[in-house]
Image: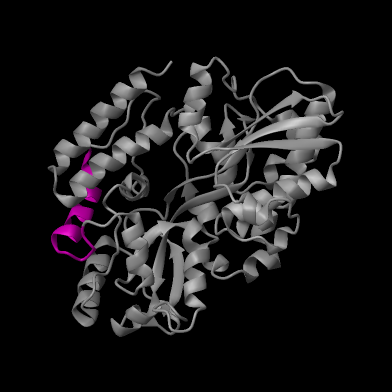
């Protein structure tokens, strides 16, 4: 049975099997969508765009460059957990995830080459359990035209807050001068949004969210302080109300608010708007990691990585996996064009990466990013529970102590069922 923590952090499963065509076949299970009609069979990675286009072209390129190997791809819906559950029910699970240290060694990849956030996300008990591929987390996507109207620009840079009090003051100034909300929020149906905010600003104050593998601690003075802050944003209507993710994205690209805190994966779409004359974001877009509001500048992050289930494999199969790892590591820059932070230090320092729009501004996420502890299982399910209860606290549907205690109870009950 796969450890659920690895399923969250190491999001794509890789296995192998034999076929009668004299090729070594690797079975690859991934998400990121299906776009074979547009990109199937294409091998020019530089011409591909978006997560689906880039990963599809990369795999086709690998197959073309390695005629003795073939990648058989199974595209699943994000985040892939229903498919894994079905495989387990059918008695065909991917088995235990194994340490990949030998594959990395064969591929000539040193864990020292990973960024701190990427390495932390795949390290369990001193061993590496996946090839990290990126770091992704929340960013402050900023409408600089509205920030200028609000008097919150210093030269060409938006003025972001350094404390929770400064954010409230700037939000009031923004609303008074623009007539629009400072923050665009996806508080409806987006549990990741609320969980990310709560996790980030509790971590920044040194809170230990999981004191052990079976318990979460949220209903603490720090947790209440953070939840009270986000409740204040909603109570004073400094942020949008009752929006889901599509509504929040549409509001931001339409110029209906100053900041939209959402993920790295939106950079490409928003930058395209910023390069289109006549659009509200035209030449008016900037993006940065979450600002420090309390304590240290730390931000909750996650990441995608390639993992290998524990099965017996031939020497050819093991060598094929190492070659696949080597290929993916060599093309980490291409994947970073999606907006995600690269997993390799060398790519962060690569002039090509630095030349991409906004990458110099978001690069600190590789060092300030912190994933949840590797011993925490069922992290995706936990995020759903925490996000649901945190959103109820932020929007006033529940009192803050009640919502946080309910989150603790539900998460602890879930973890008690995990072997």
In the image, which residues are magenta? 220-241
Image quarter of the C terminus: top left
Residue at position x 36%, y 23% in the image: 415
Residue at position x 79%, y 25% in the image: 19
Q: Decide if residue 148 is on the left or right side of residue 99.
A: left
x%, y% of residue 367?
53, 53
Q: Is residue 236 magenta?
A: yes
Residue at far front of view: 37
x%, y% of residue 346?
70, 56
Residue at position x 24%, y 27% in the image: 409
Is residue 91 in view from this perspective?
yes
Q: Decide if residue 34 is on the left or right side of residue 368.
A: right
Q: Decide if residue 254 is on the left or right side of residue 309.
A: left
Of 116 and 20, which appears nearest the observer? 20
Q: Name above or below for residue 149 compared with residue 209.
A: below
Is residue 208 in view from this perspective?
no
Q: Is residue 38 magenta?
A: no
Q: Name above or below for residue 288 compared with residue 229.
A: below
Q: How many marks?
A: 0
Q: How is the image coloured?
A: one colour
Of 131 and 381, which appears nearest the observer? 381
Q: Name above or below for residue 373 compared with residue 199.
A: above
Q: Name above or below for residue 357 compared with residue 202.
A: below
Of 131 and 69, which appears nearest the observer? 69
x%, y% of residue 273?
47, 73
Residue at position x 35%, y 58% in the image: 246
- Is most of the magenta stretch helix, strand or loop? helix
x%, y% of residue 230?
23, 54
């Amino acid at each position: 049975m796969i450890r659920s923590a690895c399923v969250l952090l190491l999001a794509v499963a890789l296995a192998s099997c034999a076929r009668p065509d004299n090729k070594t076949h690797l079975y690859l299970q991934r998400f990121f969508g299906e776009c074979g009609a547009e990109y199937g069979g294409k091998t020019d990675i530089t011409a591909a765009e978006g997560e689906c286009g880039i990963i599809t072209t990369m795999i086709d390129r690998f197959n073309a460059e390695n005629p003795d190997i073939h990648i058989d791809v199974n595209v699943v819906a994000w985040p892939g957990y229903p498919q894994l559950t079905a495989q387990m029910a059918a008695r065909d699970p991917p088995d235990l995830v194994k340490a990949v240290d030998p594959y990395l060694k064969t591929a000539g990849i040193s864990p020292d080459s990973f960024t701190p956030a990427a390495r932390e996300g795949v390290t369990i008990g001193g061993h590496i359990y996946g090839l990290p591929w990126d770091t992704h987390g929340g960013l402050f996507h900023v409408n600089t035209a509205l920030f200028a109207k609000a008097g919150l620009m210093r030269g060409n840079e938006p003025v972001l807050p350094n404390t929770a009090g400064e954010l409230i003051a700037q939000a009031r100034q923004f609303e008074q001068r623009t007539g629009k909300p400072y923050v665009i929020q996806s508080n409806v149906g987006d549990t990741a949004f609320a969980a990310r905010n709560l996790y980030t600003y509790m971590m920044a104050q040194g809170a230990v969210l999981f004191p052990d593998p079976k318990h979460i601690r949220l209903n603490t003075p720090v947790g209440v302080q953070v939840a009270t802050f986000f409740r204040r944003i909603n109570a004073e209507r400094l942020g949008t109300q009752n929006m889901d993710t599509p509504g929040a994205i549409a509001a931001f690209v339409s110029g209906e608010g100053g900041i939209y805190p959402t993920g790295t994966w939106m950079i490409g779409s928003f930058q395209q708007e910023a390069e289109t004359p006549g659009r509200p974001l035209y030449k008016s877009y900037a993006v940065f990691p979450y600002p420090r509001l309390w304590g240290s500048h730390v931000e909750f992050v996650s990441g995608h990585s390639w993992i290998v289930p524990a099965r017996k494999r031939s020497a050819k199969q093991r060598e094929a996996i190492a070659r696949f790892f080597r290929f993916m590591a060599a093309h980490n820059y291409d994947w970073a064009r999606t907006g995600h932070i690269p997993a390799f230090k060398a790519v962060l320092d690569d002039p090509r990466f630095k030349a991409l729009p906004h990458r110099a501004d978001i690069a600190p996420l590789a060092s300030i990013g912190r994933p949840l502890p590797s011993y925490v299982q069922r992290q995706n399910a936990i995020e759903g529970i925490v996000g649901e209860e945190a959103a109820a606290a932020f929007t006033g549907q529940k009192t803050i102590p009640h919502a946080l205690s309910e989150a603790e109870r539900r998460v602890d009950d879930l973890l008690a069922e995990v072997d």
